[in-house]
Amino acid sequence: MVALALVALVIMSAVAPAFFAGTAAANAGMVGLPDSNISEDLPSGAEVGVSAEDFRGSTMTTRHASTLEVVVTTPERADDYLANSSTVVGGSTGDLALVLQDSEHAAGREVALPMDAVKSALGHVPELVFGTHDDGERWTREVSEQSGLLVFEVPHFSSNAVTFEGNVTLSGDPATDGVAYEYELGSTDSVGDPVVNMTGVSNSEWDNESVTDSASGYTLGPFSGNVDPVGPGGGEPLVSVAGSTTSNSVSGFDTGRHKWITPDQFGTVKRVTVGIMQDGSYAGDGADTTYDYSIVNQDTGYVFGTYSVTISDDSSGGYDKEERTHTFNTDIDTGNIKIELTSNQGKGNIDTATVESEGPSNVVVSTSGDSIDFGNLGSSSDNGRLNVSKGGSVTVTYSGGGTLDLTVEAKEITETTDPGVELNGQWINHTGTLAEGETVSLTGNSSWIQNGTNRVNVSVGDGLSADAPPAAVGLNYQHSAASTQSVEYVGEAWSERYNVSRTWSSDRSDATLTVPFASTVAAVREVQVRLNGGDWQTTTSYTLDGTDVVVQLGSVAAGDTTEVRVNGSLVRVQNGSITVLEPTTAGNSLETTFRVDSRGENFALQVGGTDEGQFVHYLTNQSWTATEDSAVVESDGSQALYAPNAPEGGTATARTLALEVRPQTDVRVSVTDPARPEVRVGPADVTGDSVEYVFHGGDGTTHELVSASRDGAIISSSTASPAVLSYDSDTDELLYIREKASSESNAGGGGGGGGGGAVDEVRRSSSPLSSPVVIGPLGAMLVLGAFGVSRRTRVPTVAAIGASVLVGAVVVESLAPGSISGVASAVGLEFASGLGQVSPVLWLAGGGIALWGAYRLIGRLTRRETVNLNLSRGGK
């Protein structure tokens, strides 16, 4: 049963070619619609020039007249009949509209309307009809005038709306503040609400700052981001310090008493090294020379120390030099240092002087709320962790001399804060911070999406400094975008086929095609997909749920063309596969030819789910021999058609009998004579079941269920339509259904006696030689002939009597079927019980031949021996 299908026809004149004359004659092969199928639905006071009565008796169609309905209405009212369809189309111009609807059969057909009625309404004969299907599809057909009727074609009465659907997806991995996306949409007819999934992202960068020869109070930073920075390996930032001393040397002193001044900001002097050079002219004189000098603060006159150095005589004649280093336990304040030579005996002077400072001391590195005290660092190094807050700075202080190197290793971090998405001027926001990996999902409104270009802007992390890591958010923006288009399906008794195409206007992810089958399909035989005109590829990426099959198409790009072929099966093949070679169009009686592609043990066709699934199925025209086909029907109505001898590659045609079999549990049925109808029944898995037979071939007359295996025993009768015939046994038996004869004598009684007369009457009614008018005289002639032969020949009278008994039995059986054969069957005389199964003429002809043969045989056995003598007259 297909879903209710409607076609609205607006009949009007149009500029068109001459009448189309190619349609078959209206009165050839057409059937009139019942009057009850034609009605009218007109607004109060509306006049369209005709009524339903004007169309009754003259509206015809080529197929399914009993289910086709016609409603006379207006174009505006026609919309109401289409209100539940997938697309509602407004009425066309004109005054008259006809709604054609068929709730059972989808097939297209020709329709003929009375020309006078249409001309009366319009004032002229239309040349075109304009139709609208319930799915919104519009069509136009030319009209031909034939025998007083206007004939046109309705292309079909059911077209399902298949839906291509895919998600428009934008991804940012991550998306930073100010990023913009654009995408195109060709239509917004079927878009879903946009869904934005925003995931927290920790964006970071290293900000390792350092200073060499820092001064006390030097500051590094600030360290940016919207969370506290971390150091290497996690934890707090790492602070490293390294101290060193400072030295300064002076040479080239003047002769005599000299002074050397330390540089400004040198720091605290720790050591002083003095070098005394003796004049080489005194070498070899054999005398040692003592030099005296002092170290004095030139500014204050403070004497730090007075020292002496003795240089021994050098006989080599060179210049001798002695150096002395003096380390002071007390600090020498920064200032000018004077080195004064107080005694040299006229033999030498100060040649060089070096001043060395003390290393950094009382070293403290600090930030807001935390500090590290490294103490007196001197010329060593050290490190530690410092808890630096977001936006904080690091400061170093120290005393003493020398220099201090400072390094801070910190990774600045920016987490996702206050992310938002703007879609065509509409905002979706989240307030607060999203930790790393934390996701929030927000939904917009489909009304924000527009045809053409859609723009999506990302905002995240307001208020950050320029040198902070940029704020970012993991973004997944998507909405569904479905395209529904009407396509005709090819409806068959065992299959529904679709062939659809879609060109995508924008990039889509997770694209799908949804096909709503008109029937509940048992399986999907095949799904094929091709992209941009390439090769067809069979796919298994689909799901089947009742009437819908959803095909997964994956990701597609704007401009791609996707084509899909879907073949849905209403028959499930058990332990094998088939190919339908000659399908049966939906709505027609089953006559489907198929080929067995593969088969295994218990190969069968599960046919209970088809439109005729309730009827007994059988096979004809099998290409194989030794056919043992049978249908097993379960109590729930499911039915499997078994073909145990069908080979792979074998072909057969499946048909149905207008007979339902309703067993208590299960029953096996084989159709032996569909015309009679006659079936052989027997138990399937369970024996001893009662079975109900429902025959749909009657017209309300009484029908009887008869056992051919028991020589016409009547099992059950029914006057209902359809006839419901019950039997309390499913034993192996040959049964058939017949109309009950009008005469009770011919119909016979119940049970086995006399019950075969009526069925034989039905069986022989088509042969004039089976008439009692022929059989009676013919039998009498044979009896008289038998006794005549006996009297004129040597054939014994007993032979004539035997032949007469046989002729009499045949005549009686022909006049009262079952009267002889039924009794013979009851007492076990199987040969005599066959009288009712063979034509009486054949019995009489056989009897005559047998009588003639007996006569010839007896004549031969009883003939006299004869001797011929030749006599002659003698002589004397």
Image (cartoon, helix red, strand yellow):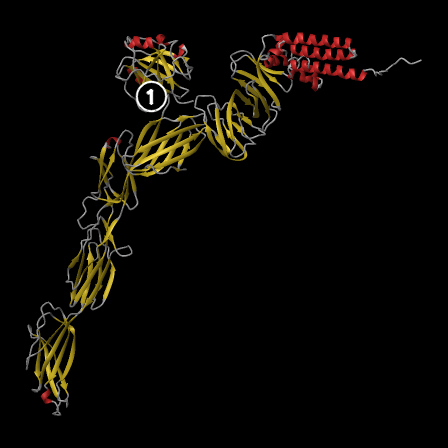
Q: Position of residue 217 (x, y in %)?
A: 15, 60
| Residue 8 visible in the displayed image | yes
Front position in the image: 430 or 357: 430
Quadrant position of residue 409: bottom left
Amino acid type for the residue under numbered disc 1: His
Q: Position of residue 502 (x, y in %)?
A: 32, 32
Q: Position of residue 370 (x, y in %)?
A: 22, 56
Q: Quadrant of the C terminus?
A: top right
Task: Estimate how packed mark 1 is, as few (under 14), some (14 to 19) or many (20 or more) residues with alpha carbons within 10 Å.
Answer: many
Helix, strand or loop at mark 1: strand
Relative vertical location of residue 312 with respect to residue 300 in this rendering, above or below: below
- Residue at the extreme bottom of the image, as rendered: 286
> Going by the image, does 648 lie left or right of 400?
right
| Residue 728 visible in the displayed image | no
Residue at image location 53% in from the left, 18% down from the top = 694
Quadrant position of residue 268: bottom left
Relative vertical location of residue 326 with respect to residue 615 in this rendering, above or below: below
Q: Which residue is mark 1?
A: 133
Residue at image location 29% in from the left, 21% down from the top = 89
